[in-house]
Amino acid sequence: MIYQTMSQKSDLLERLDITVQWGHYEIVVLRFHLTSFPAGKIIDFHNHAEFEFHFIPKGKGKVILAEQEYPLSQGMLYLTGPGVMHYQEADQEEAMDELCLHIDIRQKSRAEVDPWEVAEAEECIDKLRKLPLIPIHDRHHAMNCFLEAYEACEDKFTGYYTAIKQFVISILLKTARAYDPEGVRAEAPVRDMLTYRYEYAIQYIRANYSGAVTLDNVAEKLKISSRQLQRIFNKVNPDQSFSQILENIRLEGVCRKLSEGNQPIEQIAQSEGFTNANYLHIVFRKRLGITPATYRNGKHTIK
């Protein structure tokens, strides 16, 4: 089985000090490993002070939860919360592997947390606390997160520690989701597309204003028509057209360079998106009432 690679360094993930901030909770990882039960192995009734996530990547056996016996086989999962007594036994003729994640869930309020993250963390942890003591199929492949976390830690790729913390959250979410009734859907927060498209257009203009920026190519980046984009500009900022906003941004760039040094005005004009110094001179006098050369000697605001 592909998970057997984890047995080469069984405590690799447990060597990491992993604490995940999620909503108003702190998830402290206590154990994170693959263990194997030889055929016939019995783990007598016991409980933990923390949550333990159990996944069966290989083999078969049984578990007793709340005095009820359940068969276990490859691809199943179950969760035992704090104080839940449980008994485990591998099949008499076949060994059973188990991926285990032990976590302590602690309440920890934080300021300025994304309210959607807070709501999702609260919903997930509330579900985990109320899950039935019944093994179920790992429908959303939560156990794959164990191997991915192990490989991330082994390979030490960029951001591996952050990735491992994300895998921990994924295990929680996918476990809770496995017990959801079929067809359950939740709506994530949606954008105000009018505002989003306007702000993205402005951001794109600011990043590219020194080049040949047109209404058409900005609309193309947003995958809408130029007519749609023009309507967006009219609705969000009816006092300024696309061309006026582009001109404003270019003039801001010119003013910065005039204030910062003695670069020739012809060079400034071309670097800030104007055809030449003569055209810049015309626009500058029209908008500010003075020439670019005069501006160098004082501070003025674009009207």
Image (cartoon, rainbow, N blue to C red):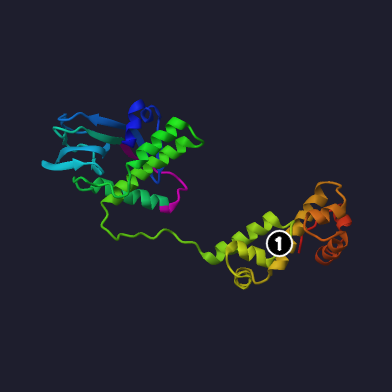
Q: How many marks?
A: 1
Q: Residue at x 29, y 36 (%)?
A: 99
User: Viewed as shown, does residue 253 lie left or right of 8?
Assistant: right
- On the question of residue 10 being in view, the answer is no
Q: Residue at x 72, y 63 (%)?
A: 246
Q: Secondary structure at mark 1?
A: loop
Q: Residue at x 63, y 57 (%)?
A: 203
- Give the quadrant of the N terminus: top left
- Give the quadrant of the C terminus: bottom right
- Residue 173: give x, y in percent of width and height: 34, 47
Q: Residue at x 72, y 67 (%)?
A: 243
- On the question of residue 129 being in view, the answer is yes
**Nearest the camera: 207 or 282?**
207
Write down the residue under mark 1: 213
User: Viewed as shown, does residue 16 lie left or right of 51?
Assistant: right
Please, is residue 232 above or below residue 292 in the view?
below
The magenta span reads 103-116
State yes or no: residue 11 in magenta: no
Please, is residue 280 above or below residue 23 in the view?
below
Task: Please tell me how crowded label 1 is: few (under 14), some (14-19), or many (20+) other residues with Cα within 10 Å.
Answer: some
Please, is residue 182 above or below residue 137 in the view?
below
**Nearest the camera: 27 or 24?**
27
- Residue 92: give x, y in percent of width and height: 13, 32
- Residue 13: give x, y in percent of width and height: 38, 30
**Nearest the camera: 37 or 269?**
37
